């Protein structure tokens, strides 16, 4: 039986008719064609599906309707503004913080979530926070460097 739900996605209100208790990842990818959020483990253990849900990071593969109905969600598609990359995205490019790119949307969204709650993280805090995101290519040092750069740019550190 179809269920109609509504929420705010990347600043715009959306409604969608879904087939019962589906994950946010399924709704984003299959119903709303927001494919930047990646499916990987399906268990909330790799971070590829990370989105921002009510200003907190969330593993969308294990987030279900009760948690996201009427919520505010930001995906990787929602970070850029008027075709200008977000400072985190710019920093990932500048630091070559990606290789295959599969984990990159989740890494960027987790970075964004980190900087929302801690605009001035230490290198150790960045490493600790980013441990929930797995990268098979091994770009971890570049990712940490990118987050440091994004933090400096976003919050104009001296």
Image (cartoon, rainbow, N blue to C red):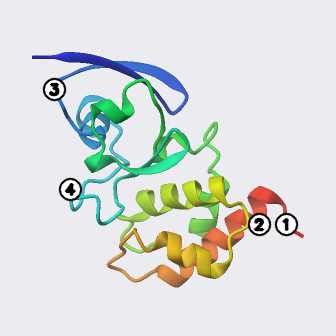
Q: Earlier in the sequence, mark 2 or mark 3?
A: 3
Q: Which is more foreground, mark 2 or mark 3?
A: 3
Q: Residues within 10 Å of mark 4 (few under 14, many from 20)?
A: some
Work out whether residue 96 can be spotted. Answer: no
Q: Earlier in the sequence, mark 2 or mark 1?
A: 2
Q: Nearer the viewer, residue 41 or 88?
A: 41
Q: Measure the alpha-carbon separation of dots 3 and 1.
A: 47 Å
Q: Earlier in the sequence, mark 2 or mark 4?
A: 4
Q: What label sits on residue 152 in the rendered view?
A: 2
Q: Measure the alpha-carbon separation of dots 4 and 3.
A: 18 Å
Q: Which residue is mark 3?
A: 20
Q: Measure the alpha-carbon separation of dots 2 and 4.
A: 33 Å
Q: Earlier in the sequence, mark 1 or mark 4?
A: 4
Instruction: Tell me the element at label 3.
Output: loop
User: What is the quadrant of the C terminus in the image?
Assistant: bottom right
| x, y percent for residue 47 | 36, 62
Q: Residues within 10 Å of mark 3 (few under 14, many from 20)?
A: few
Q: Measure the alpha-carbon separation of dots 2 and 1.
A: 5 Å
Q: Measure the alpha-carbon separation of dots 1 and 4.
A: 38 Å
Q: What label sits on residue 157 in the rendered view?
A: 1
Quadrant hosting residue 112: bottom right
Q: Residue at x 51, y 76 (%)?
A: 128
Q: What label sits on residue 42 in the rendered view?
A: 4
Question: Which residue occupies the extreme front position in the image?
Answer: 66
Instruction: Tell me the element at label 4.
Output: loop
Q: Are marks 2 and 1 in contact (CB under 8 Å)?
A: yes
């Amino acid at each position: 039986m179809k269920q109609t739900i509504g929420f705010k996605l990347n600043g715009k209100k959306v409604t969608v008719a879904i087939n019962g208790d589906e994950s946010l990842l399924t709704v984003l990818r299959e119903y709303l064609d927001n494919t930047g959020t990646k499916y990987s483990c399906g268990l909330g253990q790799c971070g590829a599906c990370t989105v921002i849900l009510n200003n907190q990071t969330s593993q969308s593969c294990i987030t279900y309707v009760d948690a996201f109905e009427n919520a505010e969600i930001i995906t990787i598609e929602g970070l850029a503004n008027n075709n200008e990359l977000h400072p985190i995205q710019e920093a990932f490019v500048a630091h070559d913080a990606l290789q295959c790119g599969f984990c990159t949307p989740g890494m960027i969204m987790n970075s964004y979530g980190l900087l929302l709650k801690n605009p001035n993280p230490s290198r150790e805090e960045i490493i600790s926070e980013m441990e929930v995101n797995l990268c098979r290519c091994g770009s971890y040092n570049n990712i940490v460097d990118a987050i440091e750069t994004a933090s400096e740019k976003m919050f104009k550190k001296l």
